[in-house]
Image: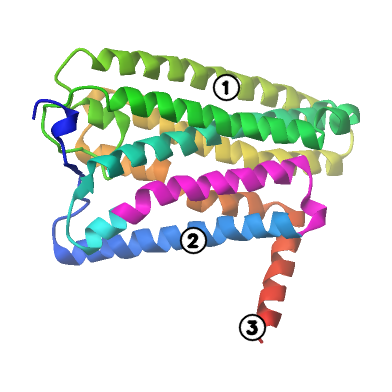
Amino acid sequence: MSNGSSLIEFLLLAFVNTRELQLLHFSLFLGIYLAALLGNGLIITAVACDHRLHTPMYFFLLNLSLLDLGSISTTVPKSMANSLWDTRAISYLGCAAQVFFFVFFMSAEYSLLTVMAYDRFVAICRPLHYGTIMGSRACVKMAAAAWASGFLNAVLHTANTFSVPLCEGNVVDQFFCEVPQILKLSCSDSYLRELGLIVVSLCLFFGCFVFIVLSYVQIFTAVLRIPSEQGRHKAFSMCLPHLAVVSLFVSTVMFAYMKPPSISSPAVDLVVAVLYAVVPPAVNPLIYSMRNKQLKEALSKLLQVVVVQQQ
């Protein structure tokens, strides 16, 4: 294989080889996927239908659920199909599409989590100016900027990755097409251009991370100054779900891409990829609904309407 243009397909890493375990893998991923669809779908419907949730915080939460649905739908269905049909193949264009959409949704989600940190900062540290700063037009612009940044990042990474000559076979050591794994198939120094882009992305990643950390330092400082215990509890309830989602996202991604080579292996990489690509989209709706009274009431009302209509 002289270059990427001669490739017709890639071979993804299989979780297991025996037929019984392949069907078990299919069942587990199907359960996780359905849970993600149900959880995020309920949040999107509740926020869209309940006028009490038409606030900046829930507007951003709706966008987060859309991104979670997109990211898990990019990787999990193909992996389930491969296990069900006992194959490892993914077409060249299918692989490129996976890279594009995965980078797009993950980048946009991280940008949106940064915006949500700013929203919490303004709500707690600048409450008198919240309505002015976080107006509907400003919120739409922030969300659009998050989606646009993800799209730009995805275009650059996909174009750079698949312009690199690939001559080290077509076996991708991951259950979905991932940029670092595809670059391992390169046989020329042209992959350095993509590595340079990855370094720039990491710098932006750490910039957003520092912004989130500084925002929460000021948030917790302000919360601890609140005289009433009820006020502190309410403020913490607003922030802890977002902080938990950010911690899950950042910790799994950082471990996946920055773990030492000494502990890197196909099996470890596979497990870590599941932790950052599959688990968060399924768990995020649960995290946000556990301590949110308004969201619980909206979801309960929505489920009651569904039950009445079925009867």
**Residue 197 placement (x, y as % from top left):** 38, 17
Instruction: Give me the residue at 38% from left, 62% from top.
Output: 30
Using a 10 Å C-alpha cutoff, classify the residue at mark 1 as few (fewer than 14 neighbours), some (14 to 19) or many (20 or more): some
Residue 144, horizontal then vertical, whole percent:
64, 33
Looking at the rendered structure, the secondary structure element under dot 1 is: helix
With respect to residue 285, does 129 lie above or below?
above
Color scheme of the displayed model? rainbow
Instruction: Determine which of the numbered discs, if any, sits on residue 310 in the image.
Output: 3
From the image, state whether disc 3 or disc 1 is nearer to you. Answer: 3
Residue highlighted by disc 1 = 208
Task: Give the dominant element type of the magenta stretch: helix, strand or loop.
Answer: helix
What residue sits 26% from the left and 38% below the top? 268
Q: Secondary structure at mark 3?
A: helix
Q: Which residues are magenta?
A: 50-78
Residue displayed at 14% across by 20% down: 187
Cα distance between the residues tagged 2 and 1 = 29 Å
- The amino acid type, in three-letter code, at marker 3 is Gln
Q: Quadrant of the C terminus?
A: bottom right
The one nearer the camera, 19 or 287, is: 19
Amino acid identity at mark 1: Cys
Residues tagged 3 and 1 counted as in contact (Cβ below 8 A): no
**Local SS, label 2:** helix
Spatial CA span between label 3 and label 2: 21 Å
Q: Which numbered disc flags the more N-terminal residue, 2 or 1?
A: 2
| 139 relative position to 165: left or right | right
Judged left or right of residue 245, residue 203 is: left
User: At which x and y percent is residue 64?
Assistant: 59, 43
**Magenta span includes 71:** yes
Q: Position of residue 253 (x, y in %)?
A: 42, 32
From the viewer's side, name the closer residue of 207 and 92: 92
Magenta-span inclusion, residue 141: no
Q: Disc number at residue 35? A: 2
